[in-house]
Image: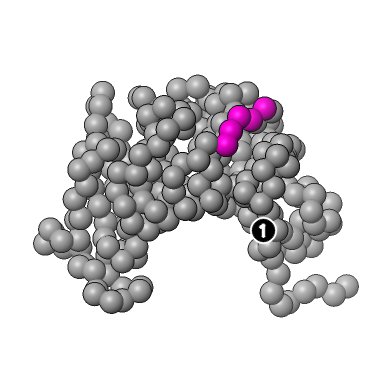
Amino acid sequence: MFLPIGPDFVFGPRDFNFKRVSVRNEFGCQAMVRQIAIDPVDANMIYVLARPVSGGGAVFRSDDGGSSWTSIFDGPQQADIGNAKAGAIALNPINADTIYVATDNSRFWVSNDRGNVWSGPTVMGGVTVRQMIVDPRSAVIIAADAAGVLVSPTGGASWSNVLAGNCTSVAASFAGPSGGDYYATIFQAGLFHAANASGPWTNLCSQGIGLPARSSGANIFGCGSVGVI
């Protein structure tokens, strides 16, 4: 039996009884999972956003802890061909039946029944959404977009760009009844912090607190390339 030793999508399973996530590839070689979201109430309810090397993205749901999967984003992709390429997924922690998916070109979709029926898209006003987080106290949505940090206090109906720049990631500590600590990495600019999602935002790389300053004119050096998890 011959097994490939060269480049592959992600993996080529030696067990051909492997239960693949995507039906696009008979041998399960292309399920490049970019993001995972787990229901905060039911740990058996898992969502994955898969992005192959080529072709469109997909969103899958498992109701049984990963033993079986259902594709749940086909409707938006068929309704908005060329635009609904999933880029980020998040759950509403206040109501886990509500899930959010944002696409590469900054379009926003909502499902209130775990992905069976979708509404949208709402135009977010950005370029490319990479990540979303949701405040568990208020359900305010915060998105990392190539145009900046996008914030929606309205469940995705309207958006504001609160920090311009090529945002690669966002993170937050939601301590207390309001406010908190919000962080965003802006490529070629720095690591930014705010006490509220709407700002004001401060570049921590210019505060002399031990973070490296951005290297002028460099593409990969300096604080602008630091990731936040």
Question: Left or right: 128 with respect to 212?
Answer: right
Question: Quick one: 120 or 191, which is closer to the camera?
Answer: 120
Residue at 63% from the left image edge and 23% from the top image edge:
113
For the image, the number of numbered tags is 1
Question: Is the residue 5 above or below the residue 198 in the image?
Answer: below
Residue at 67% from the left image edge and 39% from the top image edge:
76
Question: Quick one: 135 or 18, which is closer to the camera?
Answer: 135
Q: Is residue 228 visible?
A: no
Question: Is the residue 116 above or below the residue 72 in the image?
Answer: above
Residue at 57% from the left image edge and 36% from the top image edge:
121
Question: Left or right: 190 with respect to 27?
Answer: left
Location of residue 118 (image quadrant):
top right
Amino acid beneath label 1: Pro
Q: Is residue 164 visible?
A: yes
Residue at 20% from the left image edge and 68% from the top image edge:
213
Callout 1: helix, strand or loop?
A: loop
Question: Left or right: 215 with respect to 28?
Answer: left
Q: Position of residue 49 (x, y in %)?
A: 61, 46
The residue where tag 1 is placed is 52
How busy is the neighbourhood of tag 1: few (under 14 within 10 Å), some, or many (20 plus)? some
Q: Position of residue 66 (x, y in %)?
A: 68, 39
Question: Quick one: 217 or 208, which is closer to the camera?
Answer: 217
Q: Is residue 120 magenta?
A: yes
- Quadrant (top left, top right, bottom left, bottom right) of the N terminus: bottom right
Q: Which residues are magenta?
A: 117-121
Q: Is residue 5 magenta?
A: no
> Hey, which residue is sitting farthest left in the picture?
208
Q: Position of residue 60 (x, y in %)?
A: 67, 40
Question: Is the residue 73 above or below the residue 4 in the image?
Answer: above
Question: Is the residue 195 above or below the residue 31 in the image?
Answer: above
Question: Quick one: 49 or 158, which is closer to the camera?
Answer: 158
Secondary structure mainly formed by the magenta segment:
strand
